[in-house]
Structure formats: C-alpha cells, structure tokens
Image (spheres, helix red, strand yellow):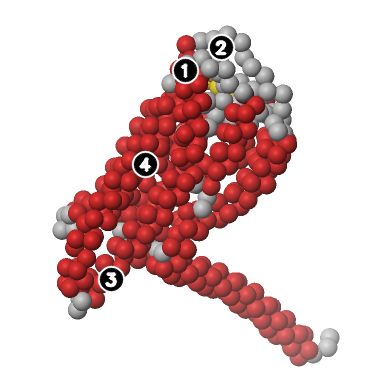
Amino acid sequence: MNTTNISVSSGPTPFLVPSNPLFLVLLYRYGLAFIFLFGFTGNLASMATFMQTTLRATSTAFLFLILAVSDSLFLLVSIFDFAEVGLMDGPILLTNYDSLCRSRWFMKGFTQFCSAWILVFVTIDRWLRTRFPFKANKWCIHRNVIIVTICIIIIGISLHSHMLSAQLLGRLQPGIATIACGPADTTSSYANFYFSQWPFIQVFFVCLIPVTLMLLGSIDIHRTIQKTKSRIQTVGTNQPQQLRQARLHRQMLILMISSIMIFFITTLPVSIRLIVAAYEVSIGKTTNINKIVRDTGILTILLNLNYAINFYVHCLTSKLFRDEFIQCTKIIYRLAGCTTGNNTNNINHTIMQSVATGNVQANIRHQQPPT
C-alpha cells in the first residue's frame, strides 16, 4: 500500500504543510540510507543464493528470487524520497515533477502488490507440496511460477493504471514527505476517490487479503505436517533421497514463515493507519495534516524494511540458506581469484617474453662483428 494516499483531506481548497519536521528529515536521511545499504546488498545476495543448484531446483526458491527482484525495484524507486526529503529537504527536479510523481506512485504501488502476492504464492506452493505431495512435482514447477508471475504483473498494472494518467495524478505538495504527489485537481471526483476509497482498495489487495491467505495456508500446513510427521519420519529413515527432500521442505517452510512474519510486522501498522485516515476523510472529520505526515513518514520507514531485511532473516533462521550463501560466496571468491591469477600469469608471461626477446636481441648485437 502506498502510504501517501491518506495524507490529505478532501475539500475544495488544498492544504499547506510548511515543511518536514526535523526528526523526519533525519529519519529519512539516516534511516533510508541504512535500509538502502543493507537492502540492495541483501537482495543481491538473495538472488545469487537462490540461483544455487540446490535451491533453484524448487519452485519456492524461484518465487523467492522473483520476490528479491520486486523488493529491489521498490527500494530503487524510494531513492527519490531519500534525496528529496532526507538530503535536500525540499522539492527537486520540478520541471518533470508531475511525470516523476506518476511513475513513482505507480511503481511503488505496483511493486508492493507484486511482492505481497508473490509471498502469497510462496505459501500456496508450500501448501500444495504439503497437502498433495504426489502431485507437487506436476503442479509446483518453474513454468507455472512464470505464468503466475505474469498474471500478478498484469493485475498489478491494471489495478494501479489510473496513477499513470496525467489528468488524474501529479504534484500535490512537492518536497513534503508522503504527500508530495496526489490528485492533479483536488476538487475533482477523482480526489474524493483517491483520498477516501483508494486507500481501502489498496489495503485490501496489498495487505488484508494476502495476510488472510498466508495465515490460512500456514495454519493448514502446520496441521498437515503434525498429522503426517511420524509417517514421513518412518518412510524416510533408510532413504537418503527422501531425507534430503524432507530437509529441503522444512527449510523452505522456515524461509516462508520468516518472510510472512516480516510482512506482518512491517505492513500491518501502515495498513491500519491508512484505514483510519481514509475513514476520517470519508466521514468528513477534521484531521491534523501535520500529524498524518509525521505518522505516515515514520511508518514509511518501517514499510521499507519489508523490502530490505529478508536476506538477513533468512540467514538467521535457515541453516540451508546459510550454507548455500556461504557456498555461493566461496564460488564467487574462487572465480575472482582465478581471474586475478590468470591476469597476473598473463602479465608475467608477457614480461618474461619481453625480457627473453630483449636478451636475444642483445646477444645478436653482441655477436655481430664490428664493421
């Protein structure tokens, strides 16, 4: 959900927020800098790890790989907020600000939608493997993951396409955290939709429905595992292949549960604030705009954490993920070492050839008789 959508109240005249609070500027400056530093690093490490041979064979890991890409796109779009609020504390690039508003707001909403529903399908993938283990190899495959991802992208674009309209969305209060962009005309019917109805739609599609599906799926997975635990252990006692599959299944469940917990903690507070503010706007209640800017600004930082810390939580909770990451690091280090070694050998070989050529030419000159 886009935390900027509830930051104003409807009415015939636009409001004014004089400036960002100092603590909010510092929070954007240092908080987002920290999130970007560890977020981009962690997401790149996640991509490399999920491409390892052991993990990439599973459809769940493929979904986590796509999730890392979506999270990185969200952080990339958020760099503008970091520059405008955290560094400059004022509007930037005013010449193209309306176009930037449309692209930023669209990409933020779109990537939030994609990340949420990819996590839903991670849960569905694990649920299918738990409930229908004999059909999982037919259903949980990379081709189906690609089809699901395309469907998510199409729905996400359709849901947020109104934000790309120049007649509907543009600058609102440039340079002010969470309310820099909004309806192009604050007296239009779209403004009423944007402030009082759109937040509910976003919260339902990006948080409440995904949260409900993930909770139901996780509960049913837990119940199914408890029922079949003894049977699985008995079957797998003397079969190494099944033991490996069971271990991989448990580790994927751990990764899923940890990601869901991050999603709950970081998105639910923002969703609650969105609903409360949208309800106040819909009933015409007078709201303190400065308080809304402050609240949504703080919750925006919390929301950004959802797209930055998955890798570190995965490392803490899953031994398989840690092992694969260490293995990936060793491979990269070895390749880098080989490249450096080859370059050094090539340089040494060239130098030796030059020296040898020089010695030969010197010997020839020495052996030539004087004229």
Q: Determine the CA span between mark 4 and mark 2.
A: 33 Å
Which label was assigned to residue 282? 1
Marked residue nearer the N-terminal end (3 or 4): 4
Residues at circles 4 and 1 in contact by the CB criterion of under 8 Å: no
Secondary structure beneath dot 4 equals: helix
Q: Determine the CA span between mark 1 and mark 3.
A: 55 Å
Residue picked out by circle 3 = 244
Q: Determine the CA span between mark 4 and mark 1.
A: 25 Å
Secondary structure beneath dot 3 equals: helix
Marked residue nearer the N-terminal end (2 or 3): 2
Q: Determine the CA span between mark 3 and mark 4.
A: 30 Å
Q: Is residue 9 left or right of residue 199?
A: right
Marked residue nearer the N-terminal end (2 or 1): 2
Toward the viewer: 284 or 296? 284
Is the C terminus in the top left, top right, bottom left or bottom right quadrant? bottom right
The amino acid on which the numbered mark 4 sits, given as a three-letter code, is Val
Toward the viewer: 78 or 298? 298
Marked residue nearer the N-terminal end (1 or 3): 3
Toward the viewer: 19 or 278? 278
Residue 40, horizontal then vertical, whole percent = 55, 51
The amino acid on which the numbered mark 3 sits, given as a three-letter code, is Arg
Which label was assigned to residue 211? 4
Tag nearer the camera, 3 or 4: 4
Residue 224, horizontal then vertical, whole percent = 21, 56
Instruction: Tell me the crowding category of disc 1: few under 14, some 14 to 19, or many 20 or more residues within 10 angstroms, Cα based.
Output: some
Task: Report the residue at 44% width, 23% height from top.
Answer: 198
Task: Report the residue at 54% width, 10% height from top.
Answer: 187
Q: Is residue 312 left or right of residue 369?
A: left
